[in-house]
Amino acid sequence: MSRKTMLSIVCLLWISTAARAQSPKASVLVDLDPNSSAQTVIVESVASDQQGLLYVCDRVTGNVLRVDPKSPKPVVVGRIETRQVDGKSVRADSSGLIFSEQGDLYLTSGAFREIVRIKKADLNPQKPGVAETFATGTEGANGIAFDKRGNLYVSGGRNGKIYRIGPAGGAAEDWAHIELHTRTLPDGKTQQALPANGLVFDAQAMVLYVADTARGAIWKVAIGSDGKAGKPNLMAQSPLLEGADGPAFDPKGNLWVAANERNAIVEVTPEGKVRDLLKNDSKGPLEFPTAVIFVGNTAYVSNFDTARRDNLAADGKTSLDGIGASIIQITP
C-alpha cells in the first residue's frame, strides 16, 4: 500500500470519527404518558422560562405542566378550563405556548379561536392559575412567536394565515398569508393541509420563519419598517422536511425543524441547505416530534406521538412500541 493511499485512509477515518463525535445525542428527559399508546396525555409544543424550566400543555386535561430538566418530574402549575359551546364541553386543544419578556405564559387555542394567558405570578404548583382570554379572532390558532416590540404572531394552520396581536391583546389582525396547499401522504389517503404551522423569529426578531407542514417547507416573512409583512419567500423545501413543524434556531444560527412524519430533526442552514440531524423508527426516542426549543446548547423536543408515517408500529395501526408523549433532550 502506498504512503498516499495510507494517508487517504487515515484522513477518511478521522473525518468519520469527527462526524460521529459531532452528531447530537437524543435521550428521553421525561415520559409524560405512562400509558404510552393510549394517548392519555397529548402535548404539541414545549417552551422554557427565563430560568430554563420547561413547560408543556396537556391537550387532554388542559393542565400546564412544568418540568425542571435537573429533576424532571412534571408538576401542574396552571390550566386551561373546558368551555360550554353549543351545549357541549369543548377543550382548548392548545397547540403552542410561549413566554413573554415579563414571564407571562401565552397559549394558543384553535378550538376557542383565542390566545389565552396565565400571568407569571399565577404559575403556581400550590394553586395552579387559570388561563384567561388575551386575544380573539385567531381561527385555527397553532404556532406562536413574539417580536421585540411585544407583538404576538400566531399561525392559523389550515387557513394559511399569520395573525398579529398587539401587546395589549384584543382582536387579532390578519398580517400575512401562506398560499393554501393540500397534499396526499404516502399512505395514499391521509390529506395534509397545514401551510402555516410552527413559527420562530430570527435573532433580530425582524424575520418570521414559518413551518409549512403541507409542502415540507420553510418560509421567511420580513417585517417592514411600517410593521407590515413582506411577501413570503421560500427558504427551503425538501422531502426531508415532510411534516415540518416547531422550528428553532440553534446557537450557530441554523434552523432545527421537527419533521414529524419522518420521526426526524432536520437542520436548515441560512443558505437553505437541508440535512437530517437525527432520525429513528417508531421505537423512538423521537415519536412524531412537533416542536424544538433551545436552552443554551441543549435542545428539547416535544413528542406528540400520533400513529402516522414513520411512527407506525409493526401492526400498522398504532405507535405501541415507543414511549408516547414525552420531552426529548438533545445534547451536542
Image (cartoon, rainbow, N blue to C red):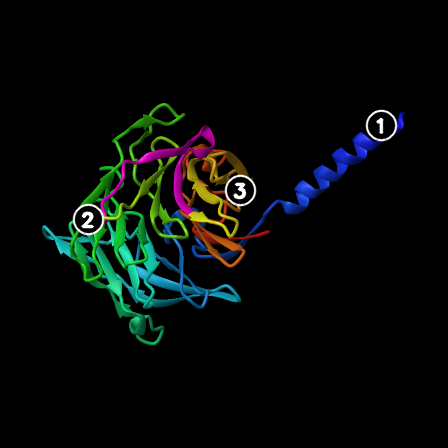
Instruction: Point out the residue furthest to the top here.
Output: 188
- Check disc 1: other Cα within 10 Å, few if <14, some if 14-19, many if 20+: few
- Check disc 2: other Cα within 10 Å, few if <14, some if 14-19, many if 20+: many
Residue at image point 29% right, 72% down:
122
Q: Amino acid at mark 3?
A: Lys
Residues in magenta? 227-247
Q: Which residue is mark 3?
A: 283
The image shows residue 10 at horizontal and vertical percentages of: 80, 35
The tag earlier along the polypeptide, 1 or 3, is 1
- Check disc 3: other Cα within 10 Å, few if <14, some if 14-19, many if 20+: some
Secondary structure of residue under mark 1: helix
Q: Is residue 20 left or right of residue 325?
A: right
Q: Amino acid at mark 1?
A: Lys
Residue at image point 47% right, 44% down:
256
The image shows residue 292 at horizontal and vertical percentages of: 44, 49
Q: Nearer the viewer, mark 3 or mark 2?
A: 2
CB atoms of marks 1 and 3 within 8 Å: no
Q: CA distance from mark 2 to mark 1?
A: 64 Å
Residue 242 in magenta stretch: yes
Q: Which residue is mark 2?
A: 138
Q: In the drawing, what numbered circle is on residue 4?
A: 1
| Residue placed most toward the observer, 41 or 331 | 331
